[in-house]
Image (cartoon, helix red, strand yellow):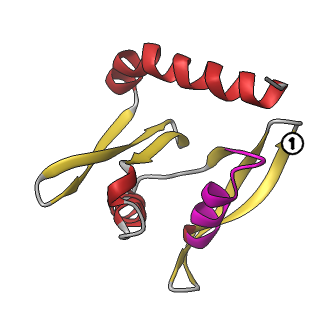
Amino acid sequence: MNDLDMFVNFRRELDVLAFPLIKDISDYREIKYNDKVVGFLMVEHGYVDSIYVEPMYRKQGLARKAVMDYLAEGKIIGHLHIINTNDTAYKFWNSVLSLVPEETNHVDTLYRVISVKKKEKIVKTIK
């Protein structure tokens, strides 16, 4: 097992252990499909802590809708981390938000959000 695998496994375990606490202290939003909870979005003080959609419900725009609904309420997403090898996460976030890398290490990158995209157009600039 390499360092990245160890980090990802540690992060998963940490998320499971910390989820009840994080859910209570962060801005937690359920992602629903036909009234069934199929995922969640958690943002704490403008930082995306987690976004998750069950695998069988992915690629249907549910995560994008959750993010856009969150922002439509006047909420801010200012920063997020993406694991460097997670191309799917990077493509998702880069399709929704304009990102600028701030800090990079061998595992992940912290991005600052500079604007929100909607159908390839910038619709809201983050200050």
Relative image position of residue 127 (x, y in whole percent): 63, 59
Q: Which residues are magenta?
A: 82-95
Q: Which image quadrant is residue 41 in?
A: top left
Foreground of the two, 83 or 23: 83
Q: Relative to 125, say whether 103 is above or below.
A: above
Identify residue type, mark 1: Thr
Secondary structure of the residue carrying numbered label 1: strand
- The answer, for residue 127, to whether it is visible in the render is no
- The residue depicted at 79 percent of the width and 23 percent of the height is 1
The crowd level at tag 1 (other Cα within 10 Å; few <14, some 14-19, many 20+) is some
Spot the residue most to the left: 35
Foreground of the two, 51 or 103: 51
User: Does the segment drawn in magenta span residue 89?
Assistant: yes
Relative image position of residue 125 (x, y in whole percent): 60, 70
Relative image position of residue 61 (x, y in whole percent): 38, 69
- The answer, for residue 65, to whether it is visible in the render is yes
- The residue depicted at 59 percent of the width and 61 percent of the height is 93
